[in-house]
Image: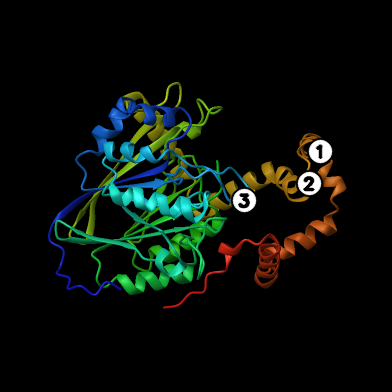
């Protein structure tokens, strides 16, 4: 715990939080050319804010050897830090599923680049203890504590390995208890959820309700790459997904992937005074970010519709529909390795005939039972020599 003497909060702080920042593909080329004018709308929105926090979705590194994992290995040019500076980002949240894609060397290079450019960072470390440390800063007399966690994939730290801060509801609760008394305002940045699903899963929602009731002031979720809604739980404001901030992908246009919001709020003393959302389109027809009245109206209407579905009953029904639509694809991914056979089985539905229900029940039990899940996970971890995936052991 930071033991410095703390006086009661006295001023105002303007804060902006944005979603996934991954300056690759066309944006990566613009970075190398020093062409940032296509992001002028974003700069105008952020330049006068006291605290601007972005989820840096990839390492900034010249490393060429990616780690062995499932999914793509992402990285951006080291010079991408110039775009972060241009956009007035002064804190990079690094707890996410891609930050270790190029190993400890890529992570270390990223941290050094940020430090050399006066950008603070949170959510990673050379071991689990260091990765858990929050970002704490006093601005205009207000002491802000920022916790940053991510769901466990291939990026998380362990007792002796570098990586991101893995989510554990026990760890987060311990951190709230440790830092709440000496903080005026506490923010949790959570990187998780199901990609392309614009609602919190039932378990995420339950966890957020539990944590919101235990002293957090704001919770912000990212990772889904699409927008979600927001809700006030007690005195805590929860934002379930901001969408991509800057993330160009060659084959995705006119898609929810291309929409996002900047979350602005003002802290007054120990309370959230007000908040607002700035909608935008990013990397759609052209690389860049556009803010306009037309875009604002369309996206805010979409968020209003999402908000009507964020309650216990609706969430469960929407989740059931999503699972039903995608379960054949999931089962094929779990049981079939050859991509051509997998495609055929998905299209024809034969996967449900070939993989017997009794075997699916067996696999379900490995997922559902906590001890069996731990046993199966660690068996694969040690077989694949995934050393950084040691289960986090919570210590107060």
Q: Which residue is mark 3?
A: 69
Coordinates of residue 256 in the picture (x, y in percent):
49, 33
Q: Give the residue at x 68% y 60%.
A: 384
Question: Position of 65 compared to 136: left or right?
Answer: right
Disc 3 versus disc 2: distance between alpha carbons? 17 Å
Numbered circle sitting on residue 341: 1
Q: Quadrant of the N terminus?
A: bottom left
Q: Residues within 10 Å of mark 3 (few under 14, many from 20)?
A: few
- Is residue 11 depicted above or below 197 in this figure? below
Residue at 45% over, 21% down:
285
Q: Nearer the viewer, mark 3 or mark 2?
A: 3
- Tell me if residue 123 comes above or below residue 58 in the rendering: below
- Quickly name the residue at label 2: 336
Task: Tell me the quarter of the picture where residue 171 sits.
Answer: bottom left
Q: Position of residue 113 (x, y in %)?
A: 35, 48
Residue 94 visible? The answer is: no
Q: Identify the residue at horizontal 83%, vertical 58% (top origin).
A: 359
User: Which dot marks residue 42?
Assistant: none
Give the quarter of the image for residue 186: bottom left
Q: Secondary structure at mark 2?
A: loop
């Amino acid at each position: 715990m930071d033991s410095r003497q703390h006086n009661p909060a006295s001023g105002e702080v303007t804060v902006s939080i944005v979603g996934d920042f991954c300056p690759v593909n066309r944006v990566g080329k613009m970075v190398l050319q020093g062409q940032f004018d296509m992001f002028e709308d974003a700069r105008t929105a952020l330049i006068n804010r006291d605290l601007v926090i972005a989820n840096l979705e990839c390492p900034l590194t010249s490393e060429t050897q990616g780690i062995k994992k499932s999914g793509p290995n992402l990285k951006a040019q080291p010079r991408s830090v110039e775009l972060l500076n241009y956009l007035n980002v002064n804190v990079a949240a690094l707890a996410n599923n891609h930050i270790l894609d190029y190993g400890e060397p890529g992570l270390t290079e990223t941290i050094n680049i940020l430090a050399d450019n006066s950008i603070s960072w949170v959510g990673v470390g050379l071991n689990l203890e260091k990765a858990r440390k929050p970002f704490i800063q006093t601005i205009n007399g207000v002491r802000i504590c920022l916790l940053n966690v991510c769901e466990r994939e291939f990026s998380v730290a362990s007792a002796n390995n570098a990586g991101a801060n893995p989510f554990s509801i026990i760890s987060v609760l311990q951190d709230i208890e440790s830092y709440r008394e000496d903080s005026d305002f506490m923010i949790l940045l959570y990187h998780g959820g199901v990609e392309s699903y614009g609602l919190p899963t039932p378990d995420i929602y339950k966890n957020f309700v539990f944590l919101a009731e235990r002293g957090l002031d704001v919770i912000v979720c990212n990772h889904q790459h699409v927008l979600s809604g927001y809700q006030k739980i007690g005195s805590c404001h929860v934002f379930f997904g901001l969408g991509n901030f800057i993330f160009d992908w060659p084959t995705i246009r006119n898609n929810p992937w291309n929409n996002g919001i900047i979350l602005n709020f003002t802290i007054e003393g120990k309370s959230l005074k007000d908040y607002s959302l700035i909608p935008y389109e990013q990397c759609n027809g052209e690389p860049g970010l556009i803010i306009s009245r037309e875009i604002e109206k369309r996206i805010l209407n979409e968020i209003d519709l999402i908000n009507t579905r964020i309650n216990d009953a609706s969430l469960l029904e929407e989740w059931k529909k999503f699972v039903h639509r995608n379960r054949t694809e999931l089962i094929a991914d779990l049981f079939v390795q050859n991509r051509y056979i997998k495609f055929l089985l998905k299209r024809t539905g034969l996967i449900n005939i070939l993989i017997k229900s009794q075997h699916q029940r067996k696999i379900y039990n490995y997922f559902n039972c906590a001890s069996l899940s731990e046993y199966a996970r660690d068996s694969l971890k040690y077989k694949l020599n995934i050393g950084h995936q040691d289960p986090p052991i919570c210590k107060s």
